[in-house]
Amino acid sequence: MLQAAICDDEPFYQEKIQSVLRQYLQTHHLECEIHLFSSGEEFLSRPKNRVNYDIVFMDISMKELDGIQTAAQIRAFHSETFLVFVTAFIDYALEGYKVNAVRYVMKDTLDTAIPECMDAILQKMQLAQVSFSFLDGEKTLYTDNILYIESRKHKSFFHYMQAASESGIVILPIYEKLDCIEQALTGHGFLRIHKSYLVNMRHIRRISGYTALLDTGEELPVPRLRYQAVREQFVAYKGIM
């Protein structure tokens, strides 16, 4: 799940940026938590915010601590955050280079500039995608959003995080053996914890007591005969993340 922050001292632009961003995320079936901040001071008052976000939309012209100063403190701790400056004036280019801003977004072009900006950010993030022919047609999925695939009888069922769903999770049935799906997802961090379950290790919180606890709170069984090997693979994965 992506983590995004919007830092702007004008409520109108906070809501406008959030609205355009949510529309983009829904269109692209991406799950994202969005947090709002009204000043650089408020953003920095929580130390973890310096390292917590994948993307930060930062207004440049804020009272007291401006966007450039706030961004400099983010960069002092975490260089991987994608910083997007939101401004009414395009005269801060040099300062933006100093903090490695990925984009400048003009406040009068938010509807078109934010989607273009997000396209560029996701490309830089290199979010992996895979395509499968489901019962209702071919779909392209972000691998990070696949929770697990379950095999039942002659079908397999993808449990997929999708922002457009009320619960956030949709079930996508497919006529495909789990062995073939596992092969197609090789290299994307999936673990066969059971003959009927292929799980995205990104979403496993822990493996203990012959169960895998997911970050959704769901528990899946791990058979006794597979348990040691499954735990070792999961520990190895967590060690290289």
Image (tube, rainbow, N blue to C red):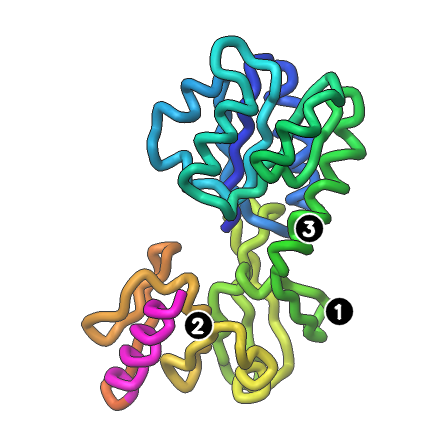
Q: Position of residue 184 (x, y in %)?
A: 60, 82
* Label 2 secondary element: strand
Three-letter residue code for mark 1: Gly
| Residue at 23% from the left image edge and 76% from the top image edge | 210
Q: Residues within 10 Å of mark 1 (few under 14, many from 20)?
A: few
| Residue at 72% from the left image edge and 41% from the top image edge | 117
| Quadrant of the rendered image containing residue 173 | bottom right
Q: Which residues are magenta?
A: 226-241
Q: Position of residue 156 (x, y in %)?
A: 55, 78
Which residue in the protein does label 1 denote?
137
Residue in the foreground of this view, choosing between 5 and 191: 5
Is label 1 or label 2 in front? 2
Three-letter residue code for mark 3: His
Which residue in the protein does label 3 denote?
28
- Left or right: residue 15 compared with residue 219: right
Q: Residue furthest top?
A: 63
Q: Position of residue 160 (x, y in %)?
A: 55, 61
Which residue in the protein does label 2 denote?
199
Q: Is residue 188 above or below residue 97?
A: below
- Specify which label sits upstream in the sequence, 3 or 2: 3
Q: Position of residue 239 (x, y in %)?
A: 33, 69
Three-letter residue code for mark 2: Val
- Specify which label sits upstream in the sequence, 1 or 2: 1
- Specify which label sits upstream in the sequence, 1 or 3: 3
Q: Is residue 138 above or below residue 43?
A: below
| Residue at 59% from the left image edge and 13% from the top image edge | 10
